[in-house]
Image (tube, rainbow, N blue to C red):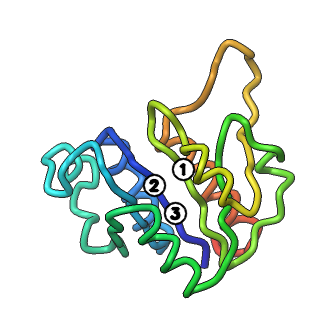
Amino acid sequence: MVRVVLVNPQIPPNTGNIARSCAATDTELHLVGPLGFEISDRYLKRAGLDYWPYVKLHYHDSFEEFAALRQQRGGREIGFSTSGTCNYIKFQFAPDDWLLFGSETTGLPAAVLESCDTTVYIPMARSGVRSLNLSVSVAAGLFEAKRQLGELE
């Protein structure tokens, strides 16, 4: 089953919305610090509503700590980035993939992008629009992966 990884998220409501998507799809959510907020932040809780008991939440103090877990559990790191090399719709997802997303302001750090097995992008119809909101990007990527893997039935 694919997993969602947020590296250094900064905005609590985005993370709360992503947590709701993960709860709805029975998807693990991994938060990699440092975070731009406290896990107990009221905006984070409000955005997640009463779905937090359904979220398979994991917190990692650093990317190195997360990478050790990923290495132990296996699977590919798929980095979502505006500079990705493949359209995410054309990419073939696998059940053990880790979908990595960076912070709202800077995206995935260069070192994290380099560690990814591949990078994908979400196409934009207008060149002046740099990116989508983080929670929208995660939902698009997660639901496409789940659709391809037949996990939305």
From the viewer's perspective, is 17 left or right of 112?
left
Q: Which residue is mark 3?
A: 4
Residues marked 1 and 2 touching at CB (< 8 Å): yes
Q: Please provide percent x and percent y for residue 58.
A: 35, 72
From the viewer's perspective, is 108 left or right of 80?
left
**Residue appearing at x 58%, y 53% in the figure:** 112
Residues marked 2 and 3 touching at CB (< 8 Å): yes
Q: CA distance from mark 2 to mark 3?
A: 7 Å
Q: Which residue is mark 1?
A: 101
Mark closer to the chain start, 1 or 2: 2
Q: Which residue is mark 2?
A: 6
Q: CA distance from mark 1 to mark 2?
A: 5 Å
Q: Please provide percent x and percent y for residue 116.
A: 68, 59
SS of the residue at dot 3? strand
Please tell me how crowded label 3 is: few (under 14), some (14-19), or many (20+) other residues with Cα within 10 Å: many
Residues marked 3 and 1 touching at CB (< 8 Å): yes
